[in-house]
Amino acid sequence: MSPRELIVLGTASQVPTRRRNHNGYLLRWDGEGLLFDPGEGAQRQMLLAGVAASDVTRLCLTHFHGDHCLGVPGVVQRLSLDRVPHPVHSHYPASGREFFARLRHACAFHETADLREEPVERDGPVATGPFGMLEARRLDHGVESYGYRLVEPDGRRMVRELLAQFGIRGPLVGELQRRGSLEVDGRTVRVADVSAPRPGQRFAFVMDTRLCDGVYALADQADLLVIESTFLHEDRALAADYGHLTAAQAARVAEECGVRRLVLTHFSQRYDDPTRFHHEAAELFGGEIVVAEDLVRVPVPARRAVPA
Ligand SMILES: [Zn+2]
């Protein structure tokens, strides 16, 4: 199983349908589990998807419409019920503090979980860690809305053949990484001599919004982009009125921003045939397209090849 993958918990906008739960997405990224926009029923969808409450390390809300946050009470209470030992950081638009307070304490329960509120006040970094940097960008919706992206910095990976060539093995490898260079048999070996560039990976999450600068900034060079496409192009007037995107707009963003794998989601209940989203997007985007279904897993694509 890929240690970096998206687990789709729900894909419906506004109201759940027989086949689609309200929104909800868990991004597994090494040791992190970022839960995005849990709508109603998220707790049960987690069960069906094999996601434990203890897998969640961060809660990221784009905005306070019900399909993006009504799952918070259940998930938050479950953290305490399961005695999740690690802190869970919560990011949400700062203007919605009052909503979050209500969701967090919607009814009586014995609170033991360490839920740390870190509201998003402006564009920019939200958190940094071994995963890289989590950033937020303002979107354009009826209420204040932020999208997120995870950016792993470029790094280097050790190449076994080169290490062997210089006679570096065992604990010496760690020492070289710590110190940056090492004396071996009278010559200096630098990390660059025995390693190759390792391009960092990017994940972007764009929910309810009209097209705006923030959408492009978030999607830029994303290996995996999860983006709302509530409507089809034929209903673009509705999309504009209600502050949403069409599949065509999402696909054009992906194409212009160099996205590799595109996940379309947050569908209006008015459409019966999900393949229409795929067809519309495929006319404008040459990369891989996933029309999300509940409970599917979408791996983050393998790292980009290093330019020769
Ligand atoms: Zn929505």
Image (spheres, rainbow, N blue to C red):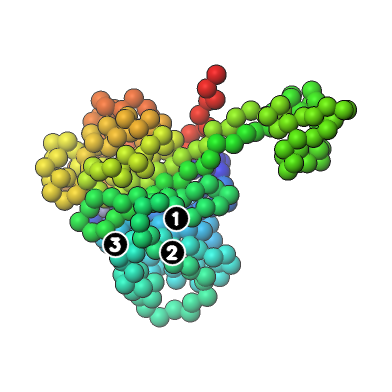
Task: Note whether 264 is above or below 33 in the view shown.
Answer: above
179 on left or right of 27: right
Residue found 44% across the figure and 35% down from its top: 223
The quarter of the picture where residue 308 lies is top right
Residue identifier under label 1: 126
Which quarter of the figure has residue 250? top left
Q: Give the crowd class for mark 3: few <14, some 14-19, many >=20 residues within 10 Å.
A: many
Residue at the spot of label 2:
118
**Is the CB–ligand 1 distance for label 1 below 8 Å?**
no
Q: Amino acid at mark 3?
A: Phe
Asked which secondary structure carries label 2, the reply is loop
Residue depicted at x 80% and y 25%: 166
In three-dimensional space, the C-alpha distance between marks 1 and 2, rounded to whole angstroms, equals 8 Å
Going from N to C along the chain, the mark reached first, 1 or 3, is 3
The amino acid marked with disc number 1 is Val
Amino acid type at mark 2: Glu
Kindly identify which numbered label has been placed on residue 64. 3
